[in-house]
Image (cartoon, rainbow, N blue to C red):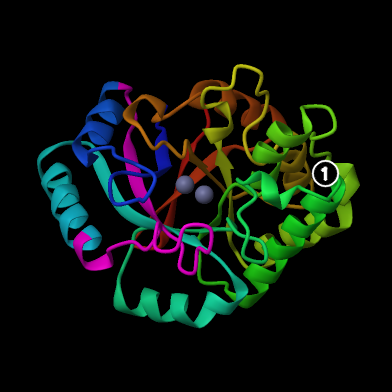
């Protein structure tokens, strides 16, 4: 079965030291069909200003050269994409950026809520899990309403990854039912705008207790029930060892839910392969 890892980072991201060649080699060794690099660009990241200011000319020049070499001489495919850290006020800058630079796939992710990344404990202080998660999903909705020029929505319940760490796995569990109207609004927006929903297996990185990717199987089932069929798959690897993490088991679960194919983007055009 074909499998593409369409969400990964290398040394152009502020939080990765991985060499692109090492990521590519690992993906080939693991038998993947292709990968898409999606390095971070998070403008106005207040927690650590500048940390995720991607060097766009260097990233696009260097990575397109690496990709061309692989794509011309092997059966493997390397794409060059980007993970945009969305904030409502950045919409116009992001539109301009996408006019200036071309990418294979654009992931729209919410990493910041009102200036604070839920990665940090400060986001949860003075809030119940339900309040914190609600705020996060409201921000996701505000982001996609402000900016619709992405291909796939990154790790929809990202907040629960770090919320579980803060509140513990019981109180911190993110239940679809607690946020049903808000999540439905996001999922329906994606469906009506022809976007994909990402299945992100980064939740399994160094976490043996993890049972679900981001978003959870419950949310993915709801997306399917609402008519959503387009999903992308990515491990969000920042190191070679995490490339393609848990893809076989997650693909089997996706098939159980009813999904028949997985999407990836080249030059912003969707392609699919069947889940066998
Ligand atoms: Zn992300
Ligand atoms: Zn990422």
Q: Please indicate, yes or no, whether residue 192 appears anywhere in the rendered image.
A: yes
Taking the view exactly as shown, the residue that stands out farthest to the top is: 208
Front residue of 183 and 174: 174
Q: Is residue 58 above or below residue 159?
A: below
Front residue of 58 and 119: 119
Q: Quadrant of residue 270?
A: bottom left
Q: Please give the name of the residue rendered at 33% of the width and 48% of the height, measured from the top-left corner.
A: 37
Mostly what secondary structure, the magenta segment?
Answer: loop
Q: Tag 1: Cα neighbours inside 10 Å, few (<14), some, or many (≥20)? A: many
Q: Please give the name of the residue rendered at 28% of the width and 37% of the height, measured from the top-left corner.
A: 18
Query: For the residue labelled by badge 1, is the local secondary structure a helix, a strand or a loop?
Result: helix
Front residue of 247 and 53: 53
- Tell me if 181 is positioned left or right of 224 in this view: right
Q: Please give the name of the residue rendered at 76% of the width and 63% of the height, measured from the top-left corner.
A: 138
- Tell me if 228 is positioned left or right of 263 in this view: right
Q: Please give the name of the residue rendered at 83% of the width and 27% of the height, measured from the top-left corner.
A: 170
The magenta stretch spans which residues? 30-58
Residue that label 1 marks = 129
Q: Please indicate, yes or no, whether residue 201 appears anywhere in the rendered image.
A: no
- The N terminus sits in image quarter: top left
Q: Is residue 4 above or below residue 231?
A: above
Q: Quadrant of residue 210?
A: top right
Marks counted in the figure total: 1
Q: Position of residue 256 (x, y in %)?
A: 69, 27
Asked whether residue 35 is drawn in magenta, I would say yes
């Amino acid at each position: 079965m074909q499998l593409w890892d369409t969400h990964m980072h290398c040394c152009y991201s502020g939080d990765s030291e991985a060499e692109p060649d090492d990521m590519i080699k690992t993906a080939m060794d693991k038998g993947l069909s292709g990968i898409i690099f999606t390095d971070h660009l998070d403008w106005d990241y207040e927690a650590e200003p500048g940390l995720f200011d991607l060097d766009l000319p260097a990233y696009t020049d260097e990575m397109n050269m690496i990709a061309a070499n692989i794509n011309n001489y092997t059966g493997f495919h390397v794409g060059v994409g980007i993970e945009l850290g969305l904030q409502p006020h950045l919409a116009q800058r992001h539109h301009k950026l996408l006019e200036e630079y071309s990418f294979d796939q654009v992931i729209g992710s919410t990493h910041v809520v009102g200036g604070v990344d839920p990665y940090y404990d400060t986001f949860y202080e003075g809030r119940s899990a339900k309040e914190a998660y609600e705020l996060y999903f409201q921000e996701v909705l505000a982001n996609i309403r402000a900016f619709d020029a992405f291909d796939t929505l990154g790790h929809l319940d990202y907040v629960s990854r770090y919320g579980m760490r803060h509140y513990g796995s019981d109180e911190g569990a993110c239940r679809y039912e607690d946020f049903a109207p808000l999540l439905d609004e996001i999922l329906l927006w994606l469906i009506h705008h022809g976007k994909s929903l990402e299945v992100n297996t980064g939740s399994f990185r160094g976490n043996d207790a993890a049972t679900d990717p981001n978003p959870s199987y419950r949310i993915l089932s709801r997306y399917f029930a609402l008519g959503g069929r387009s999903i992308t798959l990515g491990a969000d690897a920042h190191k070679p060892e995490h490339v393609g993490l848990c893809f076989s088991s997650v693909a089997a679960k996706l098939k159980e839910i009813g999904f028949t194919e997985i999407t990836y983007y080249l030059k912003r055009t969707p392609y699919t392969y069947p889940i066998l």
